[in-house]
Image: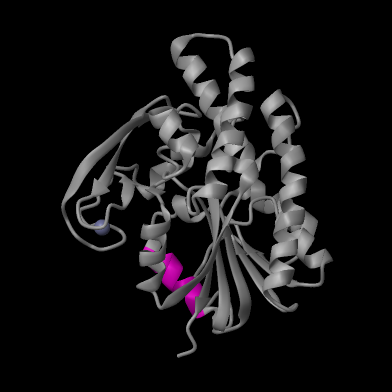
Amino acid sequence: MENLTQCPVCKETNFSPFLDCKDYTVSRETFTIVQCNSCEFKFTNPRPEPKHLGKYYESTDYVSHSKSNKGFINSLYHIAKHYSLLKKIQLINRLCKKGKLLDYGCGTGDFLNTCKVSGWEVSGIEPNDLARNTAKELLKSGINSELSENSFEKDSFNIITLWHVLEHISELDKTVETLLTFLKPNGILLIAVPNCNSYDAQIYGKYWAAYDVPRHLYHFVPKTTEKYFKNKGLSLEKILPMPLDSFYVSMLSEKYMAQETEKSTGLCMIRAVWRGYISNIKAISKQGTSSSQVYIFKKGAF
Ligand SMILES: [Zn+2]
């Protein structure tokens, strides 16, 4: 296990235990989330060594990389995915005229393909072999397995996107700083991450599916996300809610709770829909409390 001695956001060294969570998807192991005493950033600590993280992604339940339509939650996930792809491309096209887009952690390449069809020149990075090969088949070119200083031309991308990826990155500073060298001055960095300040996070506590330990190494809220990227020279332009995520996360959280208490999941799914709905209603009245959020940052023109 790897023990972080510095807060990934503010570099202070004093943390307090926040929550013990179980990995319901793969290992059934329990991991501790700590909170920085200085900036309140929450992160999984200790965490598996980077070389051991791969095995925590080895599950047929881990639907992010799966094309399977089997199972109720999986089917809903795929219907929702098509809707969210539409919303994502609408957002991208609103933010910027056509140009070059890099998706870091592009998975099976569906988002990049939607961008390509819409006229964007696309590149992607995906470390998972299975997902990357699917992306390569779909897009034919422009998919790399890893990021390096020489991956792309400096200051060349109009937009760089990380859709639910930032929270998985072991070498956070190095990766973000390298990515930023490829972003044009005034370019857009778009970050989507779960929000542990949300209603569904409060309600489900240790069962909240978006803690997703140990795959999620960091647990962001608006304050810490803005602080982290401000330190990297970016300015926060806007935070947008991701309303579908509260339903999906609530359903998974109910499933984990039912597993633990050995109850059937039938009625729990109705409660999940209700709680997902309440989470969205609350997020309308109090900004920055949506289950997952998109942060739009702009790179300063130096
Ligand atoms: Zn801190």
Q: Main secondary structure of the magenta part?
A: helix
| Front residue of this view, candidates 278 and 91 | 278
In screen coordinates, is 220 left or right of 63? left
| Front residue of this view, candidates 149 and 215 | 215
Residue 187 colored magenta?
no
Q: Quadrant of ligand 1?
A: bottom left
Q: The magenta stretch spans which residues?
A: 173-181
Q: Is residue 23 visible?
A: no
Q: Position of residue 130 (x, y in %)?
A: 65, 45
Q: Quadrant of the C terminus?
A: bottom left
Q: Position of residue 155 (x, y in %)?
A: 56, 84
What is the number of callouts on the image? Answer: 0
Relative to 148, is 99 above or below? below
Q: Position of residue 164 (x, y in %)?
A: 55, 51
* Residue pictured at 50% horizontal, 54% vertical: 287
Q: Residue 87 lies in what quarter of the image?
A: bottom right
Relative to 143, is 290 above or below? above
Q: Residue furthest front?
A: 285
In screen coordinates, is 100 left or right of 296? right
Q: Residue furthest left?
A: 14
Q: Residue 294 lies in what quarter of the image?
A: bottom right
* Residue pictured at 38% horizontal, 29% vertical: 206
| Front residue of this view, candidates 160 and 50 | 160
Q: Position of residue 192 (x, y in %)?
A: 55, 56
Relative to 161, is 59 above or below? above
